[in-house]
Image: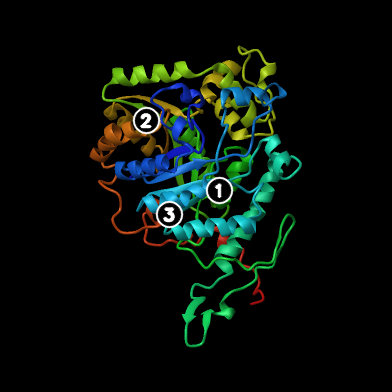
Amino acid sequence: MLDLIAYTNCAHSPAVEDAWKAPDHGQAAGYCDVDFWTDLARRLERGGFSALFFADAFNVASQYRGSIRPTVRRGEQFPENDPLPLLSALGAATDSLGLIATASTSFYPPYLLAKKLSTIDHLTDGRLGWNVVTSSGELEFRNVVGEYVAHDERYEVADEYLDVCYRLWEHSWDADAVVTERASGTYADPDAVSFIDHDGEYFEVPGPHMCAPSPQRTPMLFQAGQSERGREFAAKHAEATFSFHLSRGGFEDYVADIVDRAAEYGRSRDDIRFFPAVTPYVAPTESDAESLYDRVIDYIDPETGLVRLSNHFNHDYSQYDPDAPLADLPVEGIRGALKVFIDDDREWTVGEAAKRYARYPAVELVGDGASVADELAQWHAAGADGLVVLAPLVPRSFEAVCDHLVPELRSRGLLPESPPTAPRTLRERLFDREDPTLAASHRAWEVAPEQGER
């Protein structure tokens, strides 16, 4: 079975940056409207999606030409709202849809974020996923923490950050700590709540955790890094990966690499779910799909792609001839995204990569429901446990997937016939098991603190 995860962000255009020009792209006007989001969540839940995934960032890109003016003019991931306050409303509007949000280990103090995520996991009955990122933009670091942190050190910080969170979520409260004994006036057992007393290189967090254990305790952990350091981090911590690939072969190599690395941490293939990104241009007929694809591509201004490329790679690509080959530079930004192009079978120029990056380096599938389902069945055979679906036009593209692609996937036995009727946490749903807790092989169980003060 496949799980479909809808990709978006709290901005005007989540997948194709210039989609705001399209009259049938509702998110351009609706992204600040809670009714737009609750309606989209309900449609996705009814239509066969397992979860809704929110990307997020704090960066107003200034790398391209050393100015924010091109970013503002093109609206490159700007303006953008925060997804975390929205999740409670979406949880109330749906019954089974998972809700995955991005939050950076570079900017949130771990004690603060642990409380926020536990609260959301409570309010959504355990349907929360956390996409763990380290951030990359120079300006966002200056705005939030004062100075830039290099790529590999960001992952060192993230490693310790997650250990702090694991101690708070999994080890600070016993499962039966809340007793609510009216006769004795005891709400929670003092012997069942502990300090974590974390004293590390980057963080000093005594604890205890502010929240009682939520349905999942630790929200389901997603990770999207594809650099060498990002892959190592995913192998150690991630329960699910979200990755970009231009070919199935590249995806198969990625899965094999992560599985090999995970084995070094005592984890197996069954401990990790793999979700490659795809952008389906699906319509009732092949001709309709091709017309839609051509129209969306026509909206893209090449400069928008150069701004996004410069932002994500933290490198000014205005200095190159658009016809120059895209070089494998030691960028300090999102290295894995550059690796997608460098490792591809074809050689990309700067201009070609920019125009493609304006709509992300995800495989693009253009056709009717049957032909796109045929292709996705091959991705499933290549190791995909599900797919992160990028929608060029929202909600139109998601509706087309629900109307034309989902029935085809169901006819092939690749999707369940309907959403789950019994309540399930996101971890239970994506791993198809009746247990909301982390697997026994997970890193979280290795970092239990010494018996802390109670």
Type of the residue with mark 1: Ala
- Does residue 325 appear to the left or right of 145 in the view shown? left
Residue 33: which quarter of the image? Answer: top left
Pointers 1 and 3 in contact (CB under 8 A)? no
Q: Quadrant of the C terminus?
A: bottom right
Pointers 2 and 1 in contact (CB under 8 A)? no
Q: Quadrant of the N terminus?
A: top left
Labels 3 and 2: the sequence-earlier one: 3
Question: What residue sits right under mark 2 in the picture?
Answer: 397
Labels 2 and 1: the sequence-earlier one: 1
Visible residue check, residue 275: yes
User: Mark number for residue 235?
Assistant: 1
Nearest the eye: 138 or 222: 138
Residue at the (64%, 33%) spot, across then down: 60
Front of the two marks 1 and 3: 3
Residue 220: image x %, image y %?
48, 53
Pick out the residue farthest to the bottom.
183
Residue 368: image x %, image y %?
29, 25
Question: What residue sits right under mark 3 in the picture?
Answer: 127
Q: How far apart are marks 1 and 3 (CA)?
A: 23 Å
Type of the residue with mark 3: Arg
Mark 3 secondary-structure assignment: loop
Type of the residue with mark 2: Ser
Labels 1 and 3: the sequence-earlier one: 3
Visible residue check, residue 271: no
